[in-house]
Amino acid sequence: MSVKTNIVGWETITNFVIDAFKGYGIPEEDAKICADVLLESDKRGIESHGVNRFKPIYLDRIKAGIQNPITNFEVIKETATTAVVDGHDGMGQVIGYKAMSMAIEKAKKFGMGMVVARNSTHYGIAGYYTTMASKSGCIGITGTNARPSIAPTFGVENMLGTNPLTFGMPTDEEFPFVLDCATSITQRGRIEYYARVNKDTPAGMVVGRDGSAQTDSVQILNDLNTGNAALAPLGGIGEELAGYKGYGYATVVEILSAALQQGNFLRALSGIGENGEKVPFHLGHFFIAIDTEAFMGLEAFKKTCGDILRDLRGSVKAPGEDRIFTAGEKEYLVWQERKDSGVPINDAVQKELIAIRNDLGLTKYQFPFE
Amino acid sequence: MSVKTNIVGWETITNFVIDAFKGYGIPEEDAKICADVLLESDKRGIESHGVNRFKPIYLDRIKAGIQNPITNFEVIKETATTAVVDGHDGMGQVIGYKAMSMAIEKAKKFGMGMVVARNSTHYGIAGYYTTMASKSGCIGITGTNARPSIAPTFGVENMLGTNPLTFGMPTDEEFPFVLDCATSITQRGRIEYYARVNKDTPAGMVVGRDGSAQTDSVQILNDLNTGNAALAPLGGIGEELAGYKGYGYATVVEILSAALQQGNFLRALSGIGENGEKVPFHLGHFFIAIDTEAFMGLEAFKKTCGDILRDLRGSVKAPGEDRIFTAGEKEYLVWQERKDSGVPINDAVQKELIAIRNDLGLTKYQFPFE
């Protein structure tokens, strides 16, 4: 007799996600990529981008006809080190995987590679692609534009996506350096959490139409939907604590996600058409790979990179803090905790998974929470 | 009869700075580069890196023997798209100029170029080099490590430099997009300003040894010297407002400034030797150029980039704010104000310039403030 648990083993969830993606018309090879990107997020503990997103961000969009399950990855232009691709509203993860693979291949041949994509869709965690690069001995850099949500400094209108600017580096440690973060202070998911636990949102994260900090979490969630509130860039509202820097980095990502590839940007990424209907997001991404072997070599790079990270972790802690982390370390700790068990699935997502299974007739799957 | 003024015309200050650099042993061609980088800072209104720095950061360091006026720019390794150079403690501006020139040349041939330098010295405003790239139709990216001053998240020890992560983009406007900023919230110069005008430093910019925000500006300046205070990364102290992101970007710059080129990092960049003596800083920099012509072309890039910037500036302003800026715009406005007059020189720097002139016997220069 099996014990009920909300933890689903990796093999089960992986096979299920692949089969469900296939059930939505995604070819097997692509479904494997999509599943790997999706679940890597859960492996790292980034709940906002894992199975929680499976239905609303991917399956529902395929069903709504604003995202193609079959990905036509068209190379529009290519040089030795660069390429422009059009994703034709296919699966963002497949576009991302293929684009970063090309960038790495170019870097391995010519030292550097950069591939930019247009007409793509949500590509999952940006850090997946930089880890592809760091596993190959390359520095990886990526970013993507997204649905408008950040207001510029001195502005109150949601204009820029949360636009991650993400870096990955090979090191001599058990896990790579991965800085995978939005250029806003926070994201909607965090405010949903504050609302759930009845807490105010810390002042500075969200700006209202009156230009001041909003802190009522429930009100914020409503106002973000109507455009009456916007996320503040990293550094906060106004200039005092240097919000113009976060705004600047968000702008860099917006430019690199649209200008090189001649794709859509800013307000055009709302996903809402002229008559209020859902339309494709037409997102843009960029992927850079830099081969450490084209400089002083991979082993030397990894050692120095590791030394820097170890020195940082070993530096003087603030009273009451017993640990300094480096980027990617917390995610690695989550994986250590989860690797032998599986992914915890919350009540709402349990219901979604059961419905998907029943709907697709994937009767061979029985979940441990049933 | 001439009227006394603290504004020195561009021709006078340029020729004077070149001649003074030459008087310190810098070859003419290099002196012109150093002067151009130094004064570009004043042209953009970045007072912290212009003539205010002429004596203490460059001339005094040459005199102290920790920086060579003659720059031996040695290429250690080179591939089609990449190079590693050793600056042998020469002039950082010359190293930066030559390194970015190489990166641009490689980008023009192969689509992308990246040159990294070790054993360099203070290279002035990072934005100078990205503007070299954007003037050439390339995207420019640069960064440098620096004397330790930022504490990691949950730490209180000054470990990372203010490590700018700087981007430049060509646009179809009068001025390029230049995001030239430290990955700390602020820099020492800003706190000196607060102290001068008798203002507290806003909470969050500086962390004391007790882990809390320091706000007494005079005390901070003292504590930064003794290591009893450190700058907070962009995003602030702790994790609440995402200080780990600024800390992460500062770490990216530290890695890219040391690991590819096998140079010094973190505590080794203090400029202080074992016996308290001044020693060379042995800084590292990186320079990336990406040719827009290797993608959808320069004109298309400039147009989309300009459209993004115009849309941002035209978005809804916070009540009471009449203008939204994009990165590089305020600097351009300063230049519009100053281009026909010159650079304002404060009292302390006036005395320095007079002393330098007298010391070097550059008798042909008479300043308008005398």
Image (tube, coloured by chain):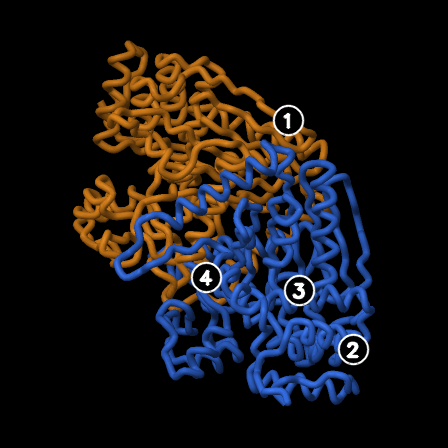
Chain colours: A blue, B orange
Tell me what residue is drawn at x 67 percent, y 35 percent.
Answer: B107
Mark 4 crowd level (few <14, some 14–19, many ≥20, 10 Å Cα): many
From this viewpoint, is residue B339 visible?
no
**Residues at marks 3 and 1 touching, judged by CB atoms closer than 8 Å:** no
Do the residues at pointers 4 and 1 share their chain? no
**Badge nearest the viewer, 4 or 1:** 1
Tell me what residue is drawn at x 74 percent, y 89 percent.
Answer: A358
Tell me what residue is drawn at x 42 percent, y 56 percent.
Answer: A325
Checking the image for residue B78, the label placed there is 1
| A60 relative to B63, above or below | below
- Quadrant in the picture for residue B43: top left
The x and y percentages for residue B59 are 32, 21
Do the residues at pointers 2 and 1 share their chain? no
The x and y percentages for residue A208 are 42, 73
Q: Secondary structure at mark 2?
A: loop
Whole-angstrom CA distance, mark 3 to mark 1, is: 36 Å
Tag 3 residue: A37
Whole-angstrom CA distance, mark 3 to mark 2, is: 17 Å
